[in-house]
Image: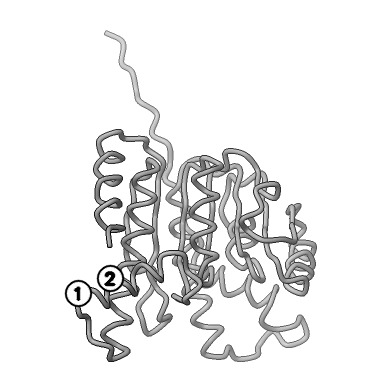
Amino acid sequence: MALYQTRVEPKPSAPSIDAVEHALRRLYIAPSDEPGRALRDEDRKKVREVTALLEEVARIGRRRVVVEAASGHAYAGLLAAQLCSGIEALTLIEREPDRVAHARAAAERLGLIADVKEGDVDDAALWPEHPDLVIGLHACGPASDAIVEMAIAKEARWLLLVPCCYAKTVAFSAAAEARAEAIGIPRQAPIRRAFIEALIDAERTLRLEAAGYEVTVRELVPRSVSGHNLLWRCRKSGEAGRMAAARAQLGRLSEQ
């Protein structure tokens, strides 16, 4: 009797916090002539955030084509390309010229080939088609919504999104404020702000589910590390029942 063995693929290993710290030191934190300089509190927090995000990247199977949108200095995208295997094409999208220049210089120091594009994240021409993974780490205000829309439009397989800031320029902010006023939410800032932010988060979640994504929301890091610490982990599944239910919920949420 022949025996058959099923090949078990090894689980991808996530980069260690020491590896992330070393890479961040090399790229951004300390010049080469100060390797022993102590990290500032904000640097240590950045190391923890990036390490936690790269753990999520490592869990994703196919990640050949990766986009980091509203990339800033491109910590997440560049370190993912350096420390997580399987990334063959990296696109970085950032509108601030100084940050674009810094990202290009950092990519050169790592010996990485990255397509660093200067422009707004809602410019479809800057995006590759059908990316395997889109990353948005601390995309401020409406940039998070633009990333959601572009990930949907470009049919990204995965989206890892950590929003930052809930300014009045966020698309659903006016509707959330109107709902707060209509049902009598007190105007004390901590109470009303929490209510409005919850509605904005709900709208983003339902919009993604209505577009066919399975969405998990959880803390990426403790709030002591970052006040903007929620991660949207979104996988394109196209489940019709989930999509229909989300569309119905989104309609109710948007009713005035």
Amino acid type at circle 1 is Ile
Q: Quadrant of residue 217?
A: bottom left
Q: Position of residue 73 (x, y in %)?
A: 67, 71
Q: What residue is shown at x 51% (from left), y 51% (from top)?
A: 149
99 lies above or below 161: below
Q: Do the CB atoms of the residues marked 2 and 1 lie less than 8 Å apart?
A: yes
201 lies above or below 159: below
Looking at the rendered structure, which numbered label has been put on residue 179? 2
Image quadrant for the N terminus? top left
Looking at the rendered structure, which numbered label has been put on residue 183? 1
Horizontally, is 228 left or right of 190 in the view? right
Q: What residue is shown at x 64% (from left), y 58% (from top)?
A: 82
Horizontally, is 111 left or right of 64 in the view? right
Q: Quadrant of residue 40?
A: bottom right
Number of marks present in the image shown? 2
Image quadrant for the C terminus? bottom left
Looking at the rendered structure, which numbered label has been put on residue 3? none
Amino acid type at circle 2 is Arg
Disc 2 secondary structure class: helix
Q: Position of residue 203 (x, y in %)?
A: 34, 59
Work out whether residue 13 or residue 235 is closer to the camera in this orientation and state it: 235
196 lies above or below 59: below
Q: Position of residue 244 (x, y in %)?
A: 27, 39
Work out whether residue 225 or residue 31 is closer to the camera in this orientation and state it: 225
